[in-house]
Structures are given as structure tokens and as C-alpha cells.
Image (cartoon, rainbow, N blue to C red):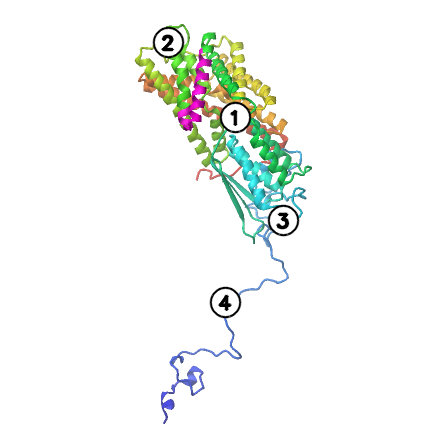
Amino acid sequence: MTYAEDRKPQTDEARGVFDPEITSEFALPDGLAVPRAGGESEATSEFALPDGLDVPQTPPAEPEGSAFSPPRTYSAKNPPPAFTPPTGVPVVSLTKDVPWQDRMRTMLRMPVAERPALEVVHKAEEEGPAVPRVLDLTLRIGELLLAGGEGAEDVEAAMFAVCRSYGLDRCEPNVTFTLLSISYQPSLVEDPVTASRTVRRRGTDYTRLAAVFQLVDDLSDPETQISLEESYRRLAEIRRNRHPYPGWVLTCASGLLAGAASVLVGGDLVVFVAAALGAMLGDRLAWLCAGRGLPEFYQFTVAAMPPAAIGIALTLAHVDVKASAVVTGGLFALLPGRALVAGVQDGLTGFYITAAARLLEVMYFFVGIVVGVLMMLYVGVQLGAHLNPDAALGNSQRPLWQIGASMLLSLTFAVLLQQERSTVLAVTLNGGVAWSVYGAMHYTGELSPVASTAVAAGLVGLFGQLLSRYRFASALPYTTAAIGPLLPGSATYFGLLSFAQNNVDKGLVSLSTAAALAMAIAIGVNLGSEISRMFLRIGSAGKRKAAKRTRGF
């Protein structure tokens, strides 16, 4: 017997192996039966389906669908009752005569699959839009709007309008307090293009803001054809445009604002002049600090000192004036009402990160004002100035003087915001209406000041939104300056005075009242704007879907 015959396995028949020449160590062990595949061997991969798994094959004739198309099992005649109401889903109709703010805001609140399809785009280049340049233009426009104080929702709507005007409908803008980003995905199988831009400098210029809104409105008009180069040229002109009012006019406006506020709370001519001088001196000191590169916190601290110092000096000189009216008038020119309204509006519309950042900015500004006034009040208390925190401000027996002062306050506030001259008259009248409503409810009707402030601010937001829709512009120039007479200057001053005199309880009560009044102003302005959209034909409830949030869980 040979060596090969001696090593031959004894179970060849059981293993299905009939070749007597297999002697390798890779031979199958005894007892393991593996069926031999007939024919030629085929190379397989680890992605091959295992034996015994039957997978039904889809019909090859059916084309590949999209993620945005309804599933094959969907039937319009028999829709799932859990997702579709019995009456059906109302059809969204966005006509061309609707302002772009409402059209873009409505589409942003829709899922991507439900947005109306783009019509024939006239602004695109022959070979298609240059996506990186369109995104860059969109970010630059959004930067100007956000830096000018516009709300996050309106900034997103403007960015979406610019992209859609150049044929980029599948884009998603994202706005935070200091960062703008936008992402565009041409199709489901292509990589998205994402760009971002940081907002580092902020400035108040509502004339520039109105020009940016006009540019977006022209881009959104389907009957106009504006190329990318033309849009960049207009945007550069907007950036290079000088402010409509010089620095000395702003300083005088700050003084007139403080004087009008002092008359609004019961001051006379001497108080008017003293408050105006204090505010103008504080404004010049703030400009000096800004030129030296100091942060805004210290600018507010320095600007709050001169009005308080003048009020204390008049008290020490035994001049028969209301020193509290002087200090209160100076505070009116510094209270950050614009940032407060924008912060609360962002929170109410669902932009919580941006709202938290704006409100934190307001808190820092307010703390700066508190520090500046408290330093002067502590000095006055140490020098023996008799300041009464229980002194009553405001005189309900001078309604005509107060209405005139409120209109002057709104006018000067509009100048400080660098508004267009064509909007100054409207916002001045809006401020007079706001104070008339507040005075009628609080002084005549003896209602709560918080409720009276909320109703007056609601009318400001309502009229401002109507005026902005009439002009096809932003609502900020028509609302921000009009809330000036409603700002809680007196409550803030008396709270700080109580703290300076070690009366913490009264101080907390007064500052809590000031905070409640500020929130009433912000919520009232936002509610008035929403009410105007609700009753206008362009902003009905069926066309502007509200965002569904967590509902408390």
C-alpha cells in the first residue's frame, strides 16, 4: 500500500468527494456535507445575498422616484385619516401682488415638498445661476439686515427671497445673533453647497435698511431682470451711502429727546433745558469713548452720568425743579428699546438662540446705565442731596403738552435711528397716538400702567405693520421710534434711587415694574403686527402656517 492510499480518507462517499488524490490539509473534515456547485465557479462578494433569502424584485419598468414624491401606496381618494383632516388640506395660494415678506415667510414655514414650484426664472444666466455668488450676495444682504436690527424671521425671509429670485429654491437659510449661514442642495444626489458669514459690527441706520428692503423687493419682482453684477453694484452703493443726518444733528436730537421726555413726566422749561444739556453732554462723551475703542457697556455707563449729575446739582443748589424729571429724561435717550423689541419678537417667533443673545445684550446695556446712574446717586446722597424716591411724576392735567412732547420724542428718536425723511412724519403721528391711548387708559380710566402700555404698544405695532405693507418696506422705521414715549424711564430711575438709599425692597418693586412695562411694550408691538397679518388679505391664517412647537413636552 502506498503512502497516498494510506492517507486517503475513509468517508469520501459520505462527503461527496470521489477524487482519491485529495490529500491537502484544506480538505473538508469528516462528517461535513457541502454540496458541490455544478459548472464553472463564480466570484462573489461580501455584499451578495445569502442562500435561502428570497428578495422580491421591483419591476424594472418603474422609474426611480424622488424623496419629495408621494409613496406608491398613497391614494388621494383614500388618504390616511390620521394625517389628513376630513375636509382636506387648504390649497396655498401665493399671488404675485403679495409683498415678498409675506410670501417668503409663508414658504419658509412650509416643508420643502409643499413649497410652490418656481416659475420661469428670468434673472438666471444662460448656463444657470452661479451658486457661490448667489449665496454670497444673499449673505451680504442678510448681514446688512441683521446688523441694522431686523428680526431673525424677516432676515431669513429676505435671504430666501434673494435665492429664490435667482432660481435656487431648495435652500435653507439660518440666522443667529452673529452668524448667518445658508445651504443649497441642487438635487438629492448632489452635494449641498453651504456658505456662512459673521456679523461683527452693528449700526443703526434705517435709511440703509429701507434701501436693502427695496433691493430685495426689486429682486423678488418677476417682471424685473436684475443681474448679479447689478445687484452687487446696488449693494455696494447702499454700503457706501452716508448717513442722512450728521453727527451734530444726532447730538441735538438726543438733547431734544431727553427734554421732551422730561416734559412728558411733569417737567417745566428749566427741566427741559437741563435734561437736554445732560443728554447732549452724555452723547458727546459716549462718542469720545467709542472713538477710543471702548465697548458699548462703558459708553452707556459714561452717557448715563451727566443727566444724573445735573439733576443732583440742581437739588444741591436748591433750585425749585423736579430733579427726578431731569434724570428720567436723560434715561429715555439711553434705554435700548429697539434691541428689546427685536429680542422679544425673535423669542415669540421661535428664534430662541437669537432672542436670548439680544436680551442678554439689552441686560448688559441696562446694567451699564444702572452703574452710571448709581455712581452719581451715591455721590449725591453722600453730599446731602434730598432725593425723594416717592415723588410722583407725570401730570394728567396737561394732556396737550404731553401729547406734543410725545410727538417730539418720537420725531427725535426717528432722527437718532437715521430714518428716511419720508417716514418721520408717520412715525411721529404714531407716537402721538400711542401716548394718547396710554394717557386715556391710565390717567383717565385709571387702569394698570402695564395693561395701558401693552394696548398702546399693540396699536403701534398694528399701525406700523399697516404702514410698512402700504410702503412695501420694513416695519421697524414705523414702530421703533413710536414706542419711545412708552419706555419705562421713571420706573427705572426710582428703582435705582431706592437702591442708592439702601431701600432694596422698593428698588426691586420699581425695577420689576420697569421690566414688566418693557415686556408689555415688546409683546404689544409683536401682537399688533400679528393681528394686522391675521386680518389682512395677504396674511390670512390659511396662508401663513404657524410653527408647531413642543407643546410643553
Report the mark closest to the observer, 1 or 2. 2
Instruction: Reply yes or no: does residue 288 show up in magenta.
Output: yes
Give the SS element for disc 2: helix
Give the SS element for disc 1: helix
Compute the Cα span from label 1 to label 2: 38 Å
Q: Main secondary structure of the magenta part?
A: helix
Q: Residue at x 41, y 18 (%)?
A: 491
Question: Could you tell me the amino acid type at mark 1?
Answer: Val
Q: State the residue position of label 2.
A: 315
Of residues 295 and 495, the one drawn nearer to the viewer in this rendering: 295
Label 3: few (<14), some or many (≥20) within 10 Å?
few
Q: Please identify the quadrant where the N terminus is shown.
A: bottom left
Compute the Cα span from label 1 to label 3: 43 Å
Q: Residue at x 68, y 44 (%)?
A: 120
Between discs 2 and 3, the one toward the N terminus: 3
Report the mark closest to the observer, 1 or 3. 1
Question: Could you tell me the amino acid type at mark 3?
Answer: Ala
Q: Which residues are magenta?
A: 274-299
